[in-house]
Amino acid sequence: MPLAPGTKLGPYEITSALGAGGMGEVYRAKDTRLGRDVAVKILPKEMSADTARKQRFEREAKTISGLNHPNICTLHDVGSQDGVDYLVMECVEGETLAKRLEKGPLPLEQVLKIGAQIADALEKAHRAGIVHRDLKPGNVMLASSGAKLLDFGLAKPAALLSGVTMTAVSPTSPVTQEGTIVGTFQYMSPEQVEGKEVDRRSDIFSLGAVLYEMLTGKKAFEGKSQLSVASAILEKEPAPIIATKPLTPRALEHAVKKSLAKLPDERWQSAGDLASELKWIAEVGVESATRGAAASTGKWSMRAIWAAMTMVAIALAIAVTYRVTRPMPGLPVLASVIPPPGVFADTAGRIGPPQISPDGKRIAFIGCKSESAAASMVGGKTCSIWLRALASTEAHEVTDTSGAYYPFWSPDGRDIAFFADGKLKRVAADGGPVQIIGDSPDARGGSWGSSGTIIFSPVRIGPIYRVPAEGGTPVAITKAARSELGGVVSHRWPHFLPDGEHFLYQNTPTGACSETSELHFASIDGKQDVSLGRTCSNGVYAHGHLILWRDGNLVAQPLDPHTGTESGSAAAIVEHASFDSLFSVAEFSASAEGKLVYMAGDSPAGSQLVWCDRNGKVLGTVGETSHYKNVAVSPDGLRVAADILGVDETKILILEGRGTRTLKTLGRSDGGTPTWSPDGREVYFTSGTNGPQDVHVMAADGSGEEREVVKFDRGQWGAVSLAVSPDGKYLAYVMFGATTDMSIYTVALRGDHKPQPFFQSSARESAPSFSPDGKWLAYESNRSGRTEVYISPFPAGGARYQVSTTGGERPTWRHDGKEIYYREGLRIMAVDVNTKAGLIALGVPKPLFELAAGNLSGRYYDVAPDGRFLANTSPLTAKAQSFSLLVNWTARLKK
């Protein structure tokens, strides 16, 4: 709640509101002891419990208190009252630079004066070891005494500069939380956009952007979305200032251009140097500065000519030497590749990492036409394959690849294979008709060999198959035997070696990361299959090395591609590489000629169960952060059943007001998917302890013995979808086989327990959900070519009514049956439902709120009887949308 005039915080009496932002609210107040006006900045009560925000708030107080400069807002006091933390600062009268820029560019004299003052303030902060990180016109106040730099709420200790010019870029840790980009996009430095650690030179870049805007009235980097702005910052140069303001001194143009250099080493190395330059331009006057700059430019142009001639001579000498000697390896270069504006790059889970072509010239990735992740959908037609040529800033969509996931290149780089609509397909990279190679209901990766054979994993649990690239009958080439616990193992993420006869693949009991997961070396004739050691990572071969993920890094291990023999020791080549433990896949690929593309970021610590209302407002959390997968709210709304996935076990938990307790531990077996009985006394779940995810039930209070409800035959697997009818008479579940698609079955819980297919269909159908009156069953199906939500009468089946219109999955009902909810992208959608005399009328889908990007595997949300939503989401962090491209990665092996 905003503070009303007259409210007192210690000796400070609030008089009026001044503004609000992401880090707090600002009020004008009266210091009753000293009789002066002050500005009071507070962190609202509802945000005080947020540890990260509070730490940043406290950091702001400590930061500002150490800065005493006429162009930095003075901190008078700090305090806390009734759980409200506040800062008391100098009350600066005037207007922000952002407000002034609404009127247009500033006169040259003002630009020079204000710019020098801001640079002086930054120099003071930098000498104190502080980087502002959010310098923008809105954080500069224009007062009668001069410019005042505001809001150090995003500041942190500056990284020390060694003084050594770095010619190669090394990966660095994110700025704050993992993957979080801090600042305001239009004024960010390239290193900020890429989520790297920043130093004082990042502030200099931001000041350059502010100077450019003061001079021209236009932003230095513009675009219709954050992605397009970020792309401009990384890849484009602003239009010359003199094109808009011809009388701008050349020295000033040079000063701004140097501030905006893409590489930190090419910018001004201190804000003090930039301040001195601006003051000099102001002192000598416009005409002198212009003439001086022109003369200086002329002198340096001649030097540049001689330097260029020297470089040409050196280049010719190198070219001649290259023919008779081995070239010296160059330094590794790290670059950022950003998808085009309006396209969200999806790499989550089975979608797959960006794939660099064998010749290293193009990157294929799954892109969704949206400015956010809201349109991303596995199995839907929202997303498709996009190609980005490294020599171009453009990217284009590959036609007829809607719903594609895990693309991979042909050896000659002319074709791309991919999975979509339950099929393995191929298409020419430059466009053409799509060819279906074979069935692949729930794929886990593929690879195209030099012999014209494709190897792939058609389902999440089972062996690797081979098939001719032109199509044919798939043949199993690995033996996915039962694990020591009885479950069938998963062979996934195959990768061909150069000879086209051998390959790598991952062997894991459940598909998720486990202590028994291994990387294997095998041959397509089945004669060789050996373990290369325990690891959760997939493997890629390039330049005589096996590349895999280990402890947050990508490492390279020498490997003989013919025998699978490892030698030497592994060397780290990339730090902080992204890894998905649920799918056991690291998000990277490598080309034959020395390029490696990957997604940066550390593995998430887990997810959080969050309560929110139908508008998305967070109401609270449930339990601790953990690796939750499926959630289910009890019929009375007082308890939550959830499963968590550990390294060596799966647990089913009951979360309630008194705390969290473990209902069942499933060891290393696959299983979980807890589902409540209608009376809330029992919990149904799947367990692979004695079979391939058989269905069991046990008392919710843990008493008594568990009972087996459905036993699957060998070659059949239950999927992560269970539902019990409101009268407790029927269980609906999903089953699929080694080469068959998902289908919904029902079984009577009283009587013969004989399973019956709900539909005889070739479509992939899952996620059953009973209506509160038990007369309808909602589910998701890809029968139209895109995953949509349908409802059908129960138990009769037959008729189908489509609920979603532009893709949807994971349906659930409101407690009174008058609405159906489902997920479209990351948005929770609602559709009105009216049933009368066995007929049904459906309303138009309307969006409610957007989920935070997080765990979208399993049943990741549910609805309580009182209308609250429970969502399983990852901690709110921003994932950079750029791919990291490492050129000549082998040079890092020398270090």
Image: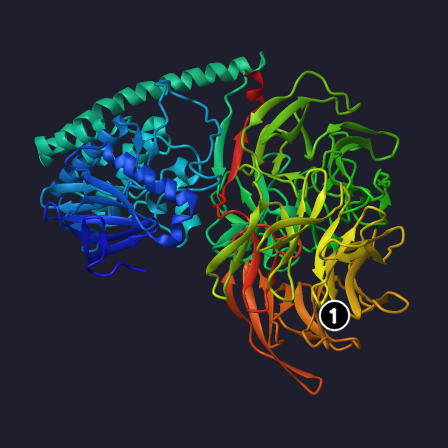
Residue 507 x %, y %:
77, 37
Residue at coordinates 48% horizontally, 61% vertically from top-left?
616
Residue 800 x %, y %:
72, 75
Q: Quadrant of residue 254?
A: top left
Indicate left or right for 510 with 32 as reference. right
Q: Which amino acid type is marked by label 1?
A: Ser
- Which color scheme did the rendering employ for the protein? rainbow
- Residue designated by label 1: 725
Q: Secondary structure at mark 1?
A: loop
Residue placed farthest to the bottom in the image? 837
Residue at coordinates 30% horizontally, 27% vertically from top-left?
129
Q: Is residue 607 above or below residue 126?
A: below
Quadrant, the C terminus = top right
Indicate left or right for 439 with 12 as reference. right
Q: Nearer the viewer, residue 751 or 217?
A: 751
Q: Is residue 291 above or below residue 752?
A: above
Quadrant, the N terminus = bottom left
Whether residue 29 is visible here, answered yes or no, is yes
Q: Nearer the viewer, residue 223 or 533?
A: 533
Indicate left or right for 196 with 565 as reference. left
Q: Quadrant of residue 420?
A: bottom right
Residue at coordinates 15% horizontally, 38% vertically from top-left?
112
Q: How many marks?
A: 1
Residue 318 x %, y %:
49, 15
Whether residue 105 is visible here, answered yes or no, is no
- Label 1 crowd (10 A; few <14 / some 14-19 / many >=20): many
Q: Quadrant of residue 592?
A: top right
Residue at coordinates 46% horizontally, 27% vertically from top-left?
169
